[in-house]
Image (cartoon, rainbow, N blue to C red):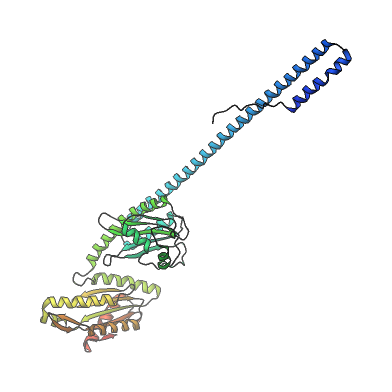
Amino acid sequence: MPTQKRPLCKKLSPFVIVLIVLAFLSLPVFIILKNSLQVLHYAFFFYLIYAIGLYAFYRNKLYKTDLLRLKREEIQEKMNSHEREILRLTDLNGSLEKKTRNYQRLEKFTEDLNNETFLDSICDIVVSETFGSFGAKGNVLLYLLNEKTHKLELRAIKKEIDTLKIQEKMGDLFDQWALRHNKPLLVEDAMSDFRFNPDRIKMELSRPVGSLICVPLVTETSSLGILRIDSAIFGAYQSDDLRFLNVIADIAKLSIENAVYFRHMQELSITDGLTGIFLRRYALERLKEEFIRAQRAADPLSFLMLDIDHFKRFNDSFGHMGGDIVLKKVAKFLKDFFDLPGSIVARYGGEEFCVILPHARKEEAMRLAESYRLMLSEHEMTLRKERVSVTVSIGVAAFPEDAPHYEDLVRCSDDALFKAKRSGRNKVCSI
């Protein structure tokens, strides 16, 4: 700011006025004492010069004081300007340090994703990294689209409060909006955002959501799902947060897409082409893993072996296509009926099937096997416009009652199956 000269005080100082008055009042004294007009003139000029000198001195002092005050104000203003600049540079430096830390995290995040091929592991890494990048605040949710139903499914979650329940397993209106418009979403105040009805938010959401950011996971070929973080606090997220989440999503979607392709290739190598269920080799590998887990945890484990009764007559009467239809129907019923946590349904070979039931005791496995046998026997199939019934014989074996080793478990269930067939078929037996 340029220095401006301020006008000096136009009024004389009271001190100078007093001096002038005293000078004039002293004139009669000179007259009385000397009675000389010349002395009077000398005294008058003396006091006049004296008053002018005092006035000039005071004026110069006042000017210097005013100039010093202006200098101080100018220096103070420069100091304030420098302080503001220092604060701006400090904030900029803090922002740069934060961005540097974030991108260092992203580098490790990318490395961790590249070391994983399984979809579930990748989903866990994505939500954990997102949660950490945002200071372990809020709730991070990763939804993936189901390829068959084309609906969102919650695949991984990281919560700020562990006891918080997330009931929106298929997403809410915010996720549907981002998916439908295929673009990122920033909501600073959920209850006042013009795009969403507050009454609908209160009705559909089971937990408080004050603000959120949401990014669709979209590749060149498909839409994979949604990555989202929300908070009960209003205004918790800004545009910079949305941009950073978008960077995380761009990295994550490539790994998720590769994991989906890998899973498809893996399923092709371990699933039966005719029935669509797992092959015997994969089932035995999983049985070995589950057996080891059950031993360590002292947890029960059951194994079912099934055989279609009189399967040869279907091939003889309706041809191999008719036999294939029976195999597919039996496999589908098995897969649907034993859709339990951790269960594995596989084609053991020919017309034989097997089911692995983790955490299931022998009595429960027998009950489930009997329910399946009864349901299948009551359901008729159509082969070449002819209604036929299909029955199965089932052998059940369980750990720890029947077998100390997973191979013994297979052998015991096979013996139980032979027992069921030998005793008339369409039965459930155990050893």
Query: Number of numbered discs present?
Result: 0
Residue at (38%, 52%) from the top-left corner?
A: 108
**Is residue 121 among what the camera can see?**
no
Residue at (53%, 36%) from the top-left corner?
A: 81
Q: Position of residue 77 (x, y in %)?
A: 56, 35
Quick one: which residue is furthest to the right in this view? 33
Left-right relation of 31 to 370: right
Q: Position of residue 306 (x, y in %)?
A: 24, 80
Look at the image and tell me in which quarter the C terminus lies. bottom left
| The image quarter in which residue 266 lies | bottom left
Left-right relation of 333 to 245: left
**Is residue 237 among what the camera can see?**
yes
- Examine the rendered structure and indicate whether residue 163 appears above or below residue 306: above
Q: Position of residue 355 (x, y in %)?
A: 28, 76
Residue at (33%, 80%) from the top-left corner?
A: 398
Which residue is more in the foreground, 268 or 192? 192
Look at the image and tell me in which quarter the N terminus lies. top right
| The image quarter in which residue 382 lies | bottom left
Residue at (37%, 74%) from the top-left corner?
A: 295
Q: Position of residue 157 (x, y in %)?
A: 40, 63
Which residue is more in the foreground, 381 or 255? 381
Left-right relation of 342 to 191: left
